[in-house]
Image: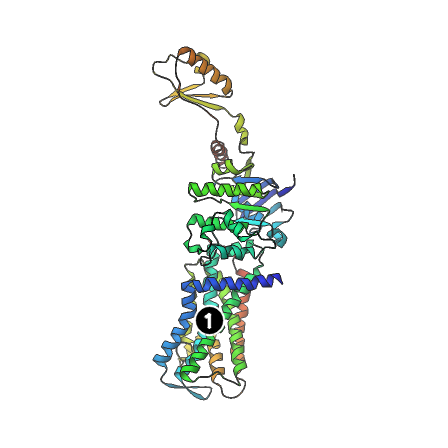
Amino acid sequence: MNDLRRALMQIVYINKAFIRSPIAAFFTLVFPIMFLVIFSVLFGNGKMQIQGVTISVATFYVPAIAAFSVVTACYTNIAISLSIARDSGALKRIRGSPLPVWAYMFAKITHSVLIAVLLVAICAAFGAVFYGATLPTTTLPAFLLALVVGAAAFCALGVAVTSVIPNSDAAPAIVNASILPLLFISNVFVPLNNPPAWLDLVSKIFPIRHFADALVKSFFQLSGSGLQTNDLLVIGAWGAAGLVVAIRYFDWEPRR
Amino acid sequence: MPVAVEITDLRKSYGSVEAVRGISLIVNEGEVFALLGPNGAGKTTTVEILEGFRRRDGGHVSVLGFDPATGDRRLKDQLGIVLQTVGVDPYLTVAETVDMFRGFYPKPRPRAEVIELVGLTEKRDSRVTKLSGGQQRRLDMAIALAGDPSLLFLDEPTTGFDPGARRSAWETIKGLAGLGKTIFLTSHSMDEVQYLADRVAIIAAGRVVAEGTPDTLAGREKAAATIRFRLPSSASELPAQLRASAKVGADGVELETKDPTRTMYELTSWAVQAGISLEGLEVTRPTLEDVYLQITHDVGAESKP
């Protein structure tokens, strides 16, 4: 019980440090909102079809950038901030203290998920206010389930990727190189409109495509549950693999 | 006296490199114990095994009655650790950082007291990024004190301090020793060890090569003394019994003696009778640093193929 209270207090400290760090706050909080505004203004004029429903491209960006927000808050934010904390010796300090390591990880992951929830809510509010793209009703459970599975998987992958990051200077490069190309070919930054078969295939190997698809489809689908079982299974498999790597290879000490 | 730390035949290798090759040590409760040694001698490896960061390959280790390799919570509750690197979040303030760590311990020391002990009261509300390097190290010390530990590990705690900051860190450590805390220190600084430690062990190439109090280490108190002085050009030759052990150089005369009381008597009575004033007269014993350099040099020469 005491340890749970300690873990919750740790979320408060992590959040304080997060909002005071210009890099973390800017790239995690401001970036997705900026992209949402720019993309929907620049590319939002056309019409497109999703699950047999005709929508304006502007509203497509609401669930698409929601997906991007989760990836940023969970994967990018966790990987970079853990690398910095590991390099500075802060993680080693924590491990030498009586705070259980699970309490620290729980706090770190919970904080990231809360940031993701906040960003998704901002995306949804933006869509509702400017484009009349209200949240789905019948498919809302499927939409929320996809968010939960995605957030969990990208948190696990964020922790896992620190095992190939040699030091905090390399962290932003490795993290961005691993997701930026995927964001362009995975129905996030650009709606995929008859992509070449090979590109379609490549993007379907990775979890971002399935996550974006699951969110976008369940956001616009008019009937049925909107549950995208296959997409969720692929995301879940990536998350499970990430968890295994994270548990096996996570380092608490600086690498030299 | 109850034992705080007991190490028996400790061994640790990294690949084919044997970093620690059979170290045995005992640290009593309430003692300030210093581990000295050149870089790569195995100091940090030894301390990090005691702190629970590293696994040992062989031997037995007991810290406050616990095996640190098990990561027992009841042990961590009683330990304070200062690592060589500063490991705190740059965006929290001094007070927030101390409070965060206080929250991890069952019986923390009051925040104001912790911050006062390391002399950061005026920086209480400053963020870590705004602190100087020395102040960050002191914050590190504050974190180690947050849980009111009974055993403190300080790994080179004053490296990079200016003389004033170093002196005040020493006073802090002395004060903690006065409160009955056991302190396990590693250091490069002979002054620091001389000033703080009740007992010293020197390790080199993974072994303990000397152990004792700073004043008696390696027979230092009984070692030959050196008497130095300058003879005025008008002076006659030294008496015969002194001439044999005298080295005359450009800077003056050096006499090595196992019995400085007698030699001084012979020298000064001769000088007074002859009406000579001996300029720059001094008697010196080998310093802790001399002893340290001698011992580690010998080991270095031995371990070469």
Q: Which residue is mark 1?
A: A71
Q: From this viewpoint, is residue B85 visible?
A: no
Q: Callout 1: few (<14), some (14-19), or many (20+) C-alpha neighbours within 10 Å?
A: many
Name the residue type under label 1.
Val
Quarter of the image where the N terminus of chain B is located: top right
Occupied quadrant, residue B213: top right
| Residue B46 higher or lower than B104, as above or below | above
Residue A50 position within the rendered picture, expressed as x and y whole percent measured from the top left: 45, 85
| Residue A181 higher or lower than B245, as above or below | below
Image point (45%, 76%), residue name? A122
Return the chain for callout 1.
A
Residue B28 position within the rendered picture, expressed as x and y whole percent measured from the top left: 61, 40
Image point (48%, 16%), residue name? B265
Question: Which residue is most to the top?
Answer: B273
Residue A70 position within the rendered picture, expressed as x and y whole percent measured from the top left: 47, 72
Residue A212 position within the rendered picture, expressed as x and y whole percent measured from the top left: 46, 77
Image point (49%, 73%), residue name? A117
**How many numbered tags mark residues here?**
1
Residue in the foreground of this view, choosing between B175 and A45? B175
The local secondary structure at tag 1 comes to helix
Image point (53%, 53%), residue name? B111
Residue in the foreground of this view, choosing between B94 and B264? B94
Q: From this viewpoint, is residue B118 visible?
A: yes
Occupied quadrant, residue B207: top right
| Residue B238 higher or lower than B25, as above or below | above
Residue in the foreground of this view, choosing between B284 and B196? B196
The figure's colour scheme reads rainbow
